[in-house]
Amino acid sequence: MEILLNILFLIIGFVLLIKGADCFVDGAAAAAKLMKISTLVIGLTVVAFGTSAPELAVSLAAAIKGSNSIALGNVVGSNMLNFFLILGISAIIMPIAAKKEVLSRDYAISLIAAALVLVLGFIGTGLGRVDGIILTACIIAYVVFLIISSKKTADKGGDDFKAMSPLKCTLFILIGLAGVVAGGQLVVTGAQTIAKFLGMSEALIALTVVALGTSLPELVTSVMAAKKGETDLALGNVLGSNIFNLLFILGASSAIRPMVPNTAAEIIEYRQTLLDLGIFIVASVIFFFPIWERKRFTRGIGIALLIFYALYFAFIMMRNYGVITMPL
């Protein structure tokens, strides 16, 4: 009975996360429009934050509760899902054009961000407050850079977002934030209990179930964009989300509550998750070359991305249940 209740908590939590994030984005974007902020700037800041809100809520709630494996695993798992599963599905639906400037800037920055987290994670005993401040400073610099570099093409109307009254904007923002915070708490509580019941580590359930749930906004956005032929949006959504996950979410979470493993089991899970981040970096670098050569994610590359994710999923499942062991 308890396990069924926690599965219900998990489902309700995901619904609150997704609906709350949507509500927050609508309200905040409309508020920005009232302040005459351009659509492009709204997209680079408000919408990017809103789509990362589920991951932020879960990682922050987990960090505060001391569940470092969920906090870190959620981000690493979401990035894995975003790049290999979501882009793979999107590319199969419709080959995704990859412009040179996107590959040399956003793709490269996502790799640099992952490498920075990996280095900081291995230095010392975990991700401390100083590490969090460094990562947060990097995301601020990234957003400022995007805004400045996009000034030439920035529009002034903000016509892509619905108009709302100031009162309605405020209500949407407050309701959205409440939904995201409550959803994050429910997801973390449910995930911890389910992990123990199924004999899964907190890191594994964070890398899979929790990561999938918090990545649903990116999945829906990218797949719908691919169906409509808006492949720039599909790719930009994934790369932008990955950068925000690594720099903003891990930065804010570790700055508020350091992610420092204490017990032997926590240290092993922490190192395993960093290993997964290393796998993400190596695989992303390998896939970069055929993508750069073709300037697109072809259907063949999409299939290869899905095959890689399936192999990775099998690897972490076998690792969790002791089929394979790795010295860490």
Image (cartoon, helix red, strand yellow):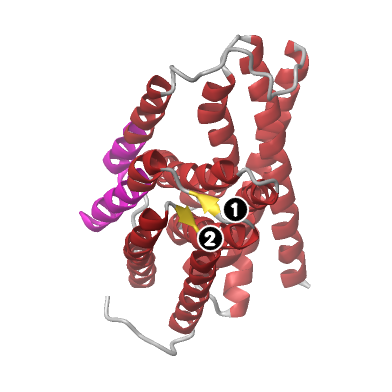
Magenta span contains residue 110: yes
Figure quadrant of residue 244: top left
- Residue 51 is situated, as x and y percent measured from the top left of the image, at 59, 40
First-in-chain label (1 vs 2):
2
Question: Mark 2: few, some, or many residues within 10 Å (few <14, many ≥20)?
Answer: many
The type of residue carrying mark 2 is: Leu
Name the residue that disc number 2 marks: 81
Q: Residue furthest front?
A: 294
- Residue 98 is situated, as x and y percent measured from the top left of the image, at 46, 48
Q: Is residue 71 visible?
A: no
SS for dot 1: loop
Residue at left offset 72%, top offset 65%: 7
Residue at left offset 38%, top offset 62%: 290
The type of residue carrying mark 1 is: Ser
Q: Disc number at residue 71? A: none
- Residue 278 is situated, as x and y percent measured from the top left of the image, at 32, 63
Q: Is residue 296 above or below residue 164?
A: below
Q: Quadrant of the N terminus?
A: bottom right
Q: Is residue 204 visible?
A: yes
- Residue 11 is situated, as x and y percent measured from the top left of the image, at 74, 58
Q: Which residues are magenta?
A: 109-137
Residue at left offset 77%, top offset 70%: 4
Magenta span contains residue 62: no
Tell me, yes or no, whether the two marked residues, 1 and 2, touch with CB atoms within 8 Å.
yes
Q: Quadrant of the C terminus?
A: bottom left
Closer to us: 131 or 245? 245
